[in-house]
Each structure stands twice: as structure tokens, then as C-alpha cells.
């Protein structure tokens, strides 16, 4: 499906799940090289920038706009192909992308034409890519809220329950970093290609885009640092609780081992065993065991083992 919007002297074509016929039609109308046209038909696992005579071909992968809001979503990484000509921009994607759809609706509203020799598709691309980067901000804010909630749960004594939560957060942060990892190098390559294609003045716009990307990465890295500290704290508190449990078990064994030993000795089938076979011998043995247990308990308390 192709949505076509005319903006002054620039045409924007947003293509959802392009078919071969649609790609052939676009290639014929806008002079798209066959190699680039073929890549539009299906998604690619690799981000890249290619400079052709009549356009720049750019592939970027983005986390879904609801990445941190819908952890169960199947398609959490989305590809967008950009073909940037002098007077046209083609955005091709293989599933709906909300920020693009919102921008299409905004720009589809008729407005007075303002012809300008400085107006070209590069400026439209600048608006589109900024919209995409800014769409991550609500998700990153939600991530920070989840981290804050996790911190409260950890210090409320729910360390064990937080193990699974922290594992899920770690998985999400790694996924979004993987998706955005290549953007820095791609934007650097795009700056060189765009300088040659649109002129030196366009460098400002690419650097502004790089600034938007840097803000997203900085926010993500801050969240990652917070996550790392929370995981370390959670592990430390779990270890402390585990050590306390082991101390208690060891102290109990220390107390009851002599008592058990006494019971075992007097349980031996020996005729000459003291106290056995006498009146109140059973209660005497119980008393000896009780005194031994009390003595061992006081010894544990005195040494502050528990």
C-alpha cells in the first residue's frame, strides 16, 4: 500500500509491505536502481547506506515504539528503508509503524505551497527521522518507572521475586541496544553521502539527527547503569539472606548435635550403661540432654553466632 503526500516541491511516498508491482512502478517513475528496487521487496537484516547518482538508499532498524510498553510483542524490531532523492522521499516498511502514520496524517493536511530552492527531500527526511527517535522517549520513561518500582520491591524484601523481573529487563535493554547499535556508524556514513548529494549546508541536519540519537543512547545507558546497580544490590541482598540462613542452620546443628550424640549413646544396647535400667533413668537422660542443649544454645548466643 502506498500513501502519497505532496509537500511543496517534495513528494513523500510511504509504502507498507511493498509488492513487486508497487516497487516496479516506483522504480520506473523515480529512476530507482534495480539493485535498490530489489532490496525494497523484502526486509534485510543489515543496516547500510548506499549513494547512487539520483538518490541515497538507507536501511535502519528501530525498536518498536511500544518496545518497553508491550514486552510480549512478537515484532519488536522494525526495519525502515529510505530512498532520498532531490525532490522525493520513499519510506518502505513491512509492518505498521505508529510514528510514521502519525506524521503522515499531520502532513496530509493541505497547506499553502511555499516554493523554495532550498527545500528538498533531505529536509523531509530530517523531520521523519526525528519523529522516529523522539517516539522512543515514552518507552524509555516507562523503563525508568519500572526500574524505580523494581528498586522499591527489592528494598521491600522481595529479592527472590525480582530475579525474574530483572532478567526480563536485562533482555529488553540488550535487545534495544542491539537494534540501535549500528545507527552511530550509519549516521556517520550518511553525513558523508548527504554532504555530497545535498551539499555542505545539509551537514547541520545530519548532525542534529545524530544529536537526537545521542540523547536516546544517553538515556538508555543511564537506565542500563541503574539496572546494573539494582541487579548487583539484589544479588548482594540475596547472598546476605542466604548467609544468614546458613548461619542459623549451622547454629542449630551446633546446638542439637551434642543432644543427638547423647541420645545415640544412651540408645546403645549395653547392660552397664549408666542411668539405664534405673527408676527415673529416662527422665535423667532427658534432663541431661536438656541441660546440654541449653548450654550449647547459651554458648551460641554468647559468641553471637545468631
Image (cartoon, rainbow, N blue to C red):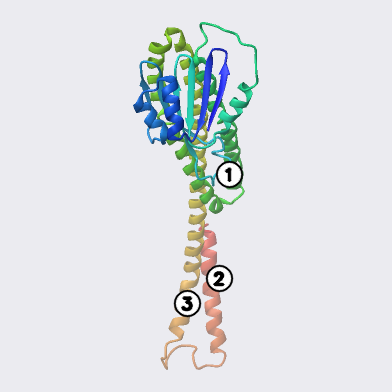
What element does badge 3 sit on? Answer: helix
Residue 57 in view here: yes
**Residue at the spot of label 1:** 150
Query: Are the residues at dot 1 and dot 2 in contact (C-beta closer than 8 Å)?
Result: no
**Above-or-below relation of 299 to 4:** below
Image coordinates for residue 5, horizontal then vertical, percent: 57, 22
The answer to whether residue 176 is above or below residue 201 is below
In the foreground, 104 or 182? 104
Give the CA separation, mark 1 to mark 2.
43 Å
- Please tell me which of labels 3 and 1 falls first in the chain: 1
Q: Nearer the viewer, residue 294 or 241?
A: 241
Residues at badges 2 and 3 in contact (C-beta under 8 Å)?
Answer: no
Farthest residue, direction top? 117
Q: Are marks 3 and 1 in contact (CB under 8 Å)?
A: no
Nearest-to-viewer mark from 3 and 1: 1
Q: Which residue is mark 2?
A: 294
Label 3 and label 1: CA atoms lie apart by: 45 Å
- Of the numbered discs 1 and 2, the one sitting upstream in the chain is 1
| Residue 236 visible at all | no
Residue 113 in the image: above or below residue 3: above
Which residue, as the protein is rendered here, is positioned at the far left?
35
Q: 192 or 147: nearer the eye? A: 192
State the mark number for residue 260.
3
- The location of residue 46, given as percent across then percent down, is 37, 33
Q: Position of residue 97 (x, y in %)?
A: 54, 34
Question: CA gap, disc 2 to disc 3?
Answer: 13 Å
* SS label for mark 2: helix
- Give coordinates of residue 298: x percent, y percent: 55, 65
Amino acid at each position: 500500500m502506498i500513501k502519497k503526500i505532496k509537500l511543496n516541491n517534495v513528494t513523500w511516498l510511504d509504502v507498507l509491505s511493498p509488492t513487486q508491482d508497487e516497487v516496479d512502478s516506483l522504480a520506473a517513475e523515480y529512476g530507482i536502481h534495480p539493485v535498490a528496487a530489489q532490496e525494497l521487496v523484502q526486509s534485510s537484516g543489515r543496516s547500510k547506506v548506499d549513494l547512487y547518482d539520483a538518490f541515497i538508499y538507507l536501511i535502519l532498524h528501530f525498536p518498536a515504539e511500544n518496545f518497553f510498553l508491550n514486552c510480549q510483542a512478537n515484532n519488536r524490531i522494525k526495519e525502515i528503508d529510505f530512498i532520498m532523492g532531490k525532490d522525493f522521499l520513499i519510506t518502505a516498511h513491512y509492518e505498521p509503524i505508529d510514528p510514521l502514520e502519525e506524521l503522515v496524517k499531520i502532513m496530509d493536511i493541505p497547506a499553502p505551497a511555499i516554493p523554495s530552492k532550498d527545500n528538498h527531500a533531505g529536509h523531509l527526511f530530517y523531520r521523519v527521522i526525528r519523529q522516529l527517535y523522539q517516539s522512543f522517549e515514552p518507552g524509555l520513561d516507562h523503563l525508568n518507572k519500572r526500574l524505580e518500582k523494581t528498586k522499591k520491591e527489592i528494598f521491600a524484601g522481595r529479592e527472590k521475586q525480582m530475579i525474574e523481573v530483572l532478567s526480563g529487563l536485562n533482555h529488553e535493554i540488550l535487545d534495544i541496544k542491539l537494534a540501535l547499535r549500528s545507527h552511530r556508524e550509519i549516521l556517520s556514513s550518511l553525513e558523508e553521502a548527504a554532504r555530497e548529494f545535498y551539499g555542505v549546508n545539509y551537514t547541520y541536519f545530519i548532525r542534529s539527527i545524530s544529536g537526537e540519537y545521542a540523547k536516546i543512547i544517553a538515556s538508555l545507558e543511564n537506565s542500563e547503569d541503574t539496572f546494573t546497580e539494582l541487579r548487583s544490590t539484589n544479588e548482594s541482598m540475596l547472598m546476605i539472606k542466604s548467609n544468614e540462613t546458613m548461619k542459623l542452620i549451622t547454629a542449630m546443628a551446633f546446638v542439637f548435635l551434642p543432644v543427638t550424640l547423647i541420645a545415640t549413646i544412651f540408645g546403645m544396647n549395653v547392660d552397664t550403661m549408666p542411668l539405664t535400667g534405673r527408676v527415673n533413668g529416662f527422665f535423667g537422660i532427658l534432663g541431661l540432654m536438656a541441660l546440654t542443649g541449653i548450654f550449647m544454645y547459651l554458648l551460641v548466643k554468647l559468641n553471637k553466632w545468631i
